[in-house]
Amino acid sequence: MAVSHADEIAAQRKRLTQLEADLDIATKRDRFGELQERAAEPGLWDDPDHARTVTTQMSRLENELGRFDGLIERLDDLEVLQELAIEEGDDASVAEVAGGLAAVDAELDRLEVVTMLGGEHDDSDAIVSVHAGEGGVDAMDWAMLLQRMYLRWAEQRGFGADVYDESYGEEAGLKSTTFEISGPGAYGWLSVEHGVHRLVRISPFDSQARRQTSFALVDVVPVLPDVDEDVEVPDEDIRVDVYRSSGPGGQSVNTTDSAVRITHLPSGLVVSCQNEKSQHQNKAVALRVLKVRLAELERLKRAEELDDIRGGVQNVGFGSQIRSYVMHPYQMVKDLRSEYETGNVQGVLDGDLDGLMEAELRRRVREAAEEA
């Protein structure tokens, strides 16, 4: 006799009902309708910035609502398949229902984590910077691997990514890089990545094939929507330097001084951009990134956060890491805060970060509840 999964389907519907309330799906449907009406207005693109804001918000809501509605449809389909399987005694179809329920259960877990992204700026886009720390050329290669990991993660989620600056090492890798990840909850997810990341492996740059430990600092700040209007940067507070964009090995990638470096003199913050087509565009992007960082410093109002952003690179070493990636003598990625670990190191480096991120978000929620 075929086994019934009716109780599991009912339990998952109950979870969906709770998520509908937690995610405020009804309000989001109303908001999506309002945005559709705005998008249909004839003069929408008379103001390109406003039009982009409308279409971006609409796209994000469409994705979120589609994800939720897709789960309802999948449960409906599984319920129909379950009824047919029981009537016909079809064990193969029952197994298909079980597999489908497991997939829905995993997706519900991920949606429940989304409800934890309730911070003030968790739904914002994020600017991520990676700085090589202790470890010489291996640390620079590690910084490049981390950049690739986050860009792969963003691609798998359907998030946008723009690389603003890459400072290459003389032999290999990156001394530092800055890029923006845009998508629903981008900052909320990536905020858990802020800190020092440690890599242990056999160095590909050591002729004696010795084990090397390398460190890199990952810095994450939210992109605030009104940062251009809210943050004023007087001309006398900045120094603007222009230089020629460079690629791996110090090679020049163009023949004009189009790359821009802006130094904020009061705070010591330095931002660069070299990947846009003109000096004017690079300066505009660099100034925007500077404003984002200044807004974050103002929001945090804590000296240690300033040290992380302005001088933390000098102290990226033993005892300061949040996560270890061990490739030798065994395979293991372990987050030292949540204690979540996985043996699939290559999968993580290819962008499979959800398990690590979710575990840390859950730990933060538990910690906040205990403190409350």
Image (tube, rainbow, N blue to C red):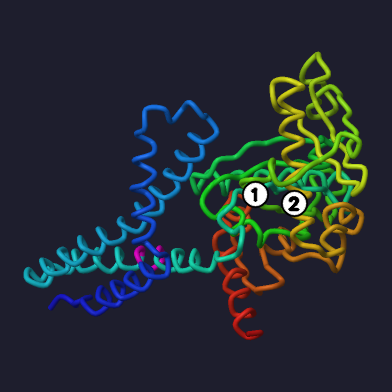
Circle 1 SS class: loop
Mark 1 and mark 2 in contact? Answer it, CB < 8 Å. Answer: yes
In front of the other: 34 or 67: 34
Circle 2 SS class: helix
Up the image or down, 331 lies above or below 36; here it is below
Residue 191 percent location from the top left of the image: 66, 59
Query: Does the image show residue 211?
Result: no
Q: Residue at x 50, y 49 (%)?
A: 157
Question: Magenta segment: does it hold 106?
Answer: yes
In front of the other: 338 or 182: 182
Q: Count residues near mark 2 (Cα–Cα under 10 Å), then give few for <14, some for 14-19, many for 20+.
A: many
> As drawn, is 120 to the left or to the right of 83?
right
Rounded to the nearest angstrom, the CA distance separating label 1 from label 2 is: 8 Å
Q: Residue at x 87, y 63 (%)?
A: 303
Quadrant in the picture for the C terminus? bottom right
Q: Earlier in the sequence, mark 1 or mark 2?
A: 1
> As drawn, is 265 to the left or to the right of 141?
right
Question: Magenta segment: does it hold 311?
Answer: no
In front of the other: 19 or 52: 52
Which secondary structure type mostly characterizes the magenta part of the structure?
helix
Quadrant in the picture for the N terminus? bottom left
> As drawn, is 127 to the left or to the right of 234?
left
Q: Which residue is mark 1?
A: 224
Up the image or down, 289 lies above or below 247; here it is below
Which amino acid, mark 2?
Ala
Residue 53 percent location from the top left of the image: 51, 40
Q: Residue at x 20, y 68 (%)?
A: 94
Which amino acid, mark 1?
Leu
Q: Please report the bounds of the magenta region as a residue range.
A: 103-107
Q: For residue 322, what is the image quadrant?
A: bottom right
Q: Which mark is residue 295?
A: 2
